[in-house]
Image (cartoon, rainbow, N blue to C red):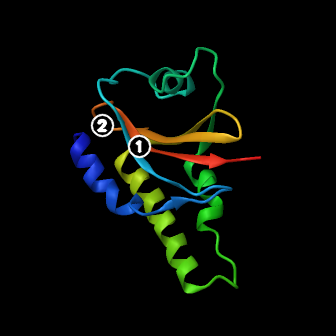
Amino acid sequence: MNQEQLEQELKPFYDGLMMRSETDSPFEFYYFENTQGLPLNADTVAKLTGKSSGSEIKTEPLDYFFRNMVRLYPEDNEMRKQEAERYKQLQERLQALLRHVQVYKADEISITAYLLGQLPNGDIAGLRTVVVET
């Protein structure tokens, strides 16, 4: 699967969906070409995203990242239930298309979150969004 095909596969799942935090941010497609052979880890993500050497990149599982987005409460209305289902479908689609999917968080407070995995050819790809954590 190439870059264009992957983006076409993912776009229906993230298009119009906002990452809810203290600020709502859209998801953006992210693809790093010619990354075959590079390990998918915090150091590689720091280099690929232009973060300075020694920048702290925190990792967390994808399901943990989406935990509050997919959680439903008895008082949730139909619109909220549909939104939660979209987050769940996005999570499942990322896991189906990419191997070793994790979330890599850079910066403090206003955090750039990279939801990345590897394609069968080794290229690193996924989504990027911003979350505010105070």
Amino acid type indicated by mark 1: Gly
Q: Is residue 85 above or below residue 79?
A: above
Q: Secondary structure at mark 1?
A: strand
Q: Secondary structure at mark 2?
A: loop
Q: Which residue in the rendered view is the most extreme toward the top?
A: 53
Q: Is residue 22 left or right of residue 53?
A: right
Name the residue rendered at 77%, 46% in the picture. 134
Q: Is residue 38 left or right of residue 53?
A: left
Q: Position of residue 104 (x, y in %)?
A: 56, 37
Name the residue rendered at 63%, 40% in the picture. 111
Q: Which residue is mark 1?
A: 126
Q: Quarter-wise, where is residue 38 in the image?
A: top left
Q: Position of residue 131 (x, y in %)?
A: 62, 48
Q: Which mark is residue 110?
A: none
Q: Which residue in the rendered view is the most extreme toward the front?
A: 23
Name the residue rendered at 59%, 46% in the picture. 61
Q: Is residue 121 left or right of residue 48?
A: left
